[in-house]
Amino acid sequence: MDAVARSRDCIGSSNARNSSLSTISYSRSSSRSWSRASVPLRPAKFLGLLYHGLLIIMLILCFSPISSLAQPTTGISDLTPDGPRSALGPSGEINRVDHAEGFWTFQPRENSQVNEDSNELEPIPGIDRKGGSLLQRSIATADNSSSSELPSAFDTLSNNFANATCVAFFDNFRSNSSFIDCHAVSLLLSNSNSFFHTLTSAVATSHVLDVACAQSVDKCSSIMKSLAKEMLQDDNCGQDYESNNGLVHSVYQEFMAYEPLYRASCLTNPDTKDYCFVDAVTNTSAPNDYNVYFIPTGSTLSSSGNLTCNECLQATMKIFAKWATVDDQALDTTYVPSAKVVNGYCGSKFATTNVTVGSDKVTVGSGQAMQLPNFRLIASLFGIVLGTMMVGVF
């Protein structure tokens, strides 16, 4: 019996020790668990600063001016992929090319007009057509006439300037051979007494256009834009421009109008085989035919004169319509009202009026054009930020 009692005491003592150990173990485990749970899991402070810094930078980039974001600007060549280009050929030859080569031609089956929605040609009354295509004629080799034998711009310039620096600027570019060789029609129209007398002869006028259309439109356009930019500088004619000097304002617009007038004045009538410009000048029964060529330099077409509703006029207005979408062109204010006058004579859809004028921002002077925010970029950034927040990065 004593042995049994001692055995029970031993078992009880062992159970007590095990219970004590179990209690201690549980207590330590609970203590460790409580200790871990009480420590807050916070992201590092620099991650929060980094997040807000990146967000601010993104917003600044989205609303930065165009000039500070090296983004390509859309040139007129992008706007008019089907526009008239220089067609190489001997003097007097009308070149006919395929659309696949990137040249623009009118090839209507009958009397036609442009549909504003589809940009296709539709039949309309009142336009006589004998056949053929209307295409810009450009001369590969013109007569080697001396520039001094051709009319020049500002041949009777009066020094009506407030600043001597502006006088010097005009004197410098008028004597610059690069400028002279372009024979810019946009500047000859209103600033050349010799060109005015040349217009009395169709042959002489055609010769001037032969030489003018033989020049590189890209090179001369670059020269004219550069001169326009330089003219607005304070050490040239900037102060006269700010003082609303009429001549300086007009010349600026004429510099900018070089290319649209180059393309329009070099078009050839498929019926007469002459330049459309020459036909317009010599058509005394429709004086507005000639006035059409002043639209790019700031004049609005008057409804008081007759118009010839032919392919030449339609092609010319199409060129002007596309250049009216370019900012810093006088066409962005003169084209639409002039097109309405044309449509009053030639039919409601003869010249398109469905254009967004000045939609392509091309700033050549001082100042910056603000770009609208890139909403796709903003949406993408928002998605990235939202996604990273959901997975707990920030």
Image (cartoon, rainbow, N blue to C red):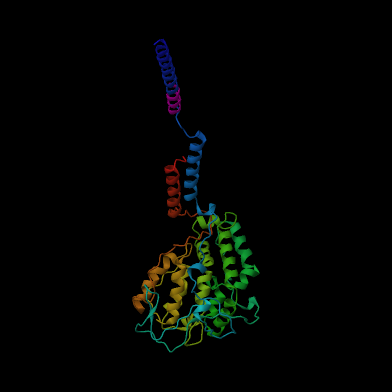
Q: Nearer the viewer, residue 239 or 100?
A: 100
Q: Which residues are magenta?
A: 27-37
Is residue 31 on the magenta stretch?
Answer: yes
Determine the residue located farthest toward the bottom in the rendered image.
130
Residue in the foreground of this view, choosing between 42 and 141: 42
Quadrant of residue 107 within the rendered picture: bottom left
Residue found 63% across the figure and 64% down from its top: 172
Image location (x, y in percent) of residue 193 = 55, 74
Magenta residue check for 173:
no
Q: Residue 209, can we see it? A: yes
The picture places residue 41, in percent across and down from the top left corner, at 46, 32
| Residue at point 62%, 60% (across, down) | 168
Q: Quadrant of the N terminus?
A: top left
The residue at the far top in this view is 2
Query: What is the magenta segment's predominant secondary structure?
Result: helix
Quarter of image, res 157:
bottom right
Q: Is residue 90 above or below residue 116?
A: below
Task: Residue 153 in the image: state x and y as whole percent.
Answer: 57, 71
Closest to the observer: 284 or 324? 324
